[in-house]
Image (cartoon, grey):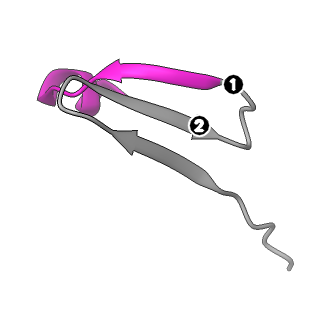
């Protein structure tokens, strides 16, 4: 079985987390808050 590599980048700031998952191919911005992080 071959497991393909997948990269996820997260840029952390006080207010936001900018997330890019190459598997999805689209950037996403969420609030840097417990509720938003647990939802994702």
**Please, which residue is most extreme toward the bottom here?**
1
- Which residues lie in the magenta part? 27-40
Q: Are marks 1 and 2 in contact (CB under 8 Å)?
A: yes
Image mark for residue 11: none
Q: Position of residue 12 (x, y in %)?
A: 32, 41
Residue at left 44%, top 31%? 18
Q: Earlier in the sequence, mark 1 or mark 2?
A: 2
Q: Is residue 28 left or right of residue 33?
A: right
The reply to whether the magenta stretch includes residue 31 is yes
Q: Is residue 9 above or below residue 32?
A: below
Using residue 36 as the reference point, say whether residue 11 is left or right of it: right
Q: Secondary structure at mark 2?
A: strand
Q: Is 11 in the magenta?
A: no
Pinpoint residue 27: horizontal percent, then vertical percent.
61, 25
Q: Nearer the viewer, residue 40 or 22?
A: 22
Crowdedness near tag 1: few (<14), some (14–19) or many (≥20) residues, C-alpha within 10 Å: few
Q: Which residue appears farthest toward the front when viewing the image?
A: 13
Q: CA distance from mark 1 to mark 2?
A: 6 Å
In the displayed image of the protein, which residue is found farthest to the left? 34
Quadrant, the N terminus = bottom right
Q: Which mark is residue 20?
A: 2
Q: Residue at x 54, y 48 (%)?
A: 9
In the picture, which quadrant includes the C terminus?
top left
Q: Nearer the viewer, residue 28 or 5?
A: 28
Residue identified by numbered label 1: 26
Q: In the image, is residue 10 above or below residue 34?
A: below
Task: State which quadrant residue 38 falls in.
Answer: top left
Identified at 21% across, 23% down, the residue is: 15
């Amino acid at each position: 079985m071959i497991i393909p590599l997948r990269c996820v980048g997260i840029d952390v700031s006080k207010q936001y987390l900018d997330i890019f998952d190459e598997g999805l191919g689209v950037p996403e911005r969420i609030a840097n808050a417990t509720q938003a992080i647990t939802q994702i």
